[in-house]
Image (tube, rainbow, N blue to C red):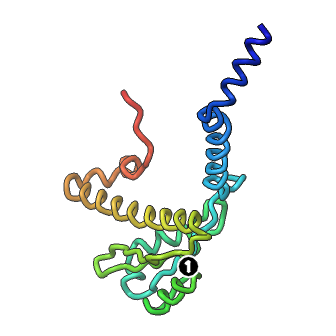
Amino acid sequence: MFNTIITTVKTLLRRPSTWVWGALFPIALSTMFMFMFANLSSDGTVDPVPVAVVADEAWDASTFKDVAASLAKAGDDQLLDVSEYEDLAAARKALKAGEVAGIYTVDAAGTPRLTLLSSYDSSRASTVLTDRSILETVASSYTQNAELMSQIAQDNPAALADPEAVARALSLEAEPAA
């Protein structure tokens, strides 16, 4: 019995597939996971994303300014670190210098626009991608919610009188099945 086990182990160790799938693949996979998840913080919080805003008349008149300000309030759930610039040229200079991850501008209709660098530092790739994702999500969520509220106001203006209905419409949580 013991001789059979020894012979089987020796035979298996002579096969290249045993070494690849039994030793090399798990090492390669664990190394890849280590690099993928190395930047996750242990406390589960996200560092505020530095973002520039062009503080012009359109920005001051926009409700997106209030959204950005609420996301920039200091606290445990601070998502943005907003820096105001007087014009787009100064904001682009800060973006190219790496001081901010993106630039928010607001057009005359009040729609936010996001400007990002087309290239980025590969040594900070995961941080840059996370920052981009957060900035894009903030702008797109605001735009979708604004369109939703506009559509509700056109279709059923009385629905806006119920704050709970508005909160449910803007909520990301699914409603329980009846």
Q: In the rendered view, would you say 81 is above or below 157?
A: below
Q: Position of residue 123 (x, y in %)?
A: 62, 70
Left of 33 or right of it: where is 164?
left
Q: Position of residue 153 (x, y in %)?
A: 25, 58
Left of 11 or right of it: where is 173?
left
Q: Which residue is mark 1?
A: 100
Which residue is drawn at the image coordinates 31% and 54% (left, top)?
160
The foreground one among 49 and 64 is: 49
Q: Return the residue found at the far top.
A: 1
Q: In the rendered view, would you say 27 is above or below 73?
A: above
Q: Residues within 10 Å of mark 1 (few under 14, many from 20)?
A: many
Q: Quadrant of residue 139?
A: bottom left
Q: Position of residue 95 (x, y in %)?
A: 52, 83
For numbered disc 1, what is the local secondary structure?
loop
Which residue is drawn at the image coordinates 64% and 65% (left, top)?
47
Q: In the rendered view, would you say 48 is above or below 30?
A: below
The foreground one among 53 and 147 is: 53
Number of marks in picture: 1
Which residue is drawn at the image coordinates 49% and 87% (left, top)?
91
The foreground one among 27 and 35 is: 27
The foreground one among 11 and 131 is: 11
